[in-house]
Structure formats: structure tokens, C-alpha cells
Image (cartoon, rainbow, N blue to C red):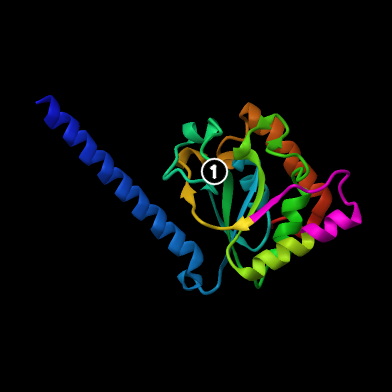
Amino acid sequence: MGLLIVLSISCQSQSDKKTNKLKSNKMTAQILDSNTDSNLDSALLGAGCFWCVEAVFQRVPGVKQIISGYSGGALVNPSYKEICEGTTGHAEVILVKYNPAEVSFETLLSVFWQTHDPTTLNRQGNDIGTQYRSAIFYLNENQKLIADKIKKDLNESGAFRSPIVTEITAFTNFYEAEDYHQNYYNLNSSQGYCQYVIAPKLEKFEKVFGNQFRKK
């Protein structure tokens, strides 16, 4: 009986892994397939806690959908608990679906670099760990060229006191975060972290971009 239980658990585990891998592959295909919606493009960005980054980009006109998730590591279908251990290799990221006729990839990167500190390695404020690293996971060669050029220009211009350490690397995977992470700030704006960490980021966003990016 003990052997049967072990075999059953083992088979179930392998089945779960296969299901999760198929889910990941399906999400990956959707991100890379530009035909999923001919009007929208995608960007995959990490800039610390995804609650913060999501809240900022939700306020950029032309952005149609944001999905918080995990990317850049090897662990299949990671949980938030595993991500918080900082050993998965994944970063907290947002998948941005946007209309390029309304907002460009360059503009998204302008928002990205001006609303977090891209000079601190594996850290944003009190959030410390590789999961909070500054990262751009490019989806095609054009995105890579744009990201590399802007990063180079910013470093050469001395826009930041220290060199930018933002990782610019090819997209390999994306795992959607648990439901309670989605649309987090809008649903939990009175929560402590939202008040003391996210709200100031949104204020900075408003000061930097003003009416240009204020949604009607």
C-alpha cells in the first residue's frame, strides 16, 4: 500500500509539472505571437515589487492590460512564497499589453527608468533580493536595440549618479502571479505598503509626467 501511495504521488507530481509546463508554454506563445491581437504589442518589465510597477503603468494612456508575474528564472510555475525566498532566479515583473499607436516602447521605457532606481543591484528601497532586480526582458531584437541604446545614452549623460544596472536580457518564460496580486493597488490602496511605498511612487509619476500621462 505504501508503494502504491508513493507511486500515486509521484505520478501526480509529474502530471502537475507537465500541466504547468504546458501552461507556461501557452503563455509564452501568447506573448511572442503578435497575432494574438493585431492592435497590441507587449513589454515585460521588472522594477522591484510588481504591485508598485503595475500601479504606475496602469496610469499610462495606451496601456490596455497588465498582468503581474514572474520571469527570468529556471523554476517552473513558481509560487509567491518561493519567489520571496530569492532563490528561484525569477524577477517580479509586469507584462504590459499596449497599443503602439497610442504609446511607444520608448515611452514605456522612459516611464520605467524614471519611476524606480535602476542603479541599485537587486534592490528597490527596503525590498531586497534578486526577485526585485531592475530588468527588461526583450521580446524581439528591436526592443533589445531600443533598450540598449537608451540605457547607454542615460549612462553617458549622467542622468543618474551611479551607473544603471538594469538587466537587459532575452525573454524565456513568464508565469502569471496568483490572483490576489493582480490589480493590487487599486483594490488595496488603504493598505500600509500601498500608502507608504506605492502612493509616493504615483506622486512622483504625476510630478515627472504631469498631464501628459494622466488618464481621463
- The residue at 55%/49% (across/down) is 72
The residue where tag 1 is placed is 90
User: Which residue sits at x=15%, y=29%?
Assistant: 5
Rendered position, 199 above or below 138: above
- Judge left or right: residue 45 versus residue 181: right
Q: Nearer the viewer, residue 176 or 134?
A: 134
Residue 154 painted magenta: yes
The amino acid type of the residue labelled 1 equals His
Q: Is residue 214 above or below residue 183?
A: below
Q: How many marks?
A: 1
The C terminus: image quadrant: bottom right
Q: Secondary structure at mark 1?
A: loop
- Residue 169 on image: x %, y %: 62, 56
Q: Quadrant of the N terminus?
A: top left
Query: Is residue 5 found left or right of 179 in the rendered image?
Result: left
Residue 130 place in picture, x, y as percent: 62, 38
Magenta region: which residues?
151-168
Task: Tell me if I can see residue 103 in this picture.
Answer: no
Looking at the picture, does residue 94 appear above or below residue 139?
above
Q: Which residue is found at the position 81% from the left and 59% from the top? A: 152
- Depicted 62 relative to depicted 50: above or below: below
Q: Residue at x 29, y 44 (%)?
A: 16
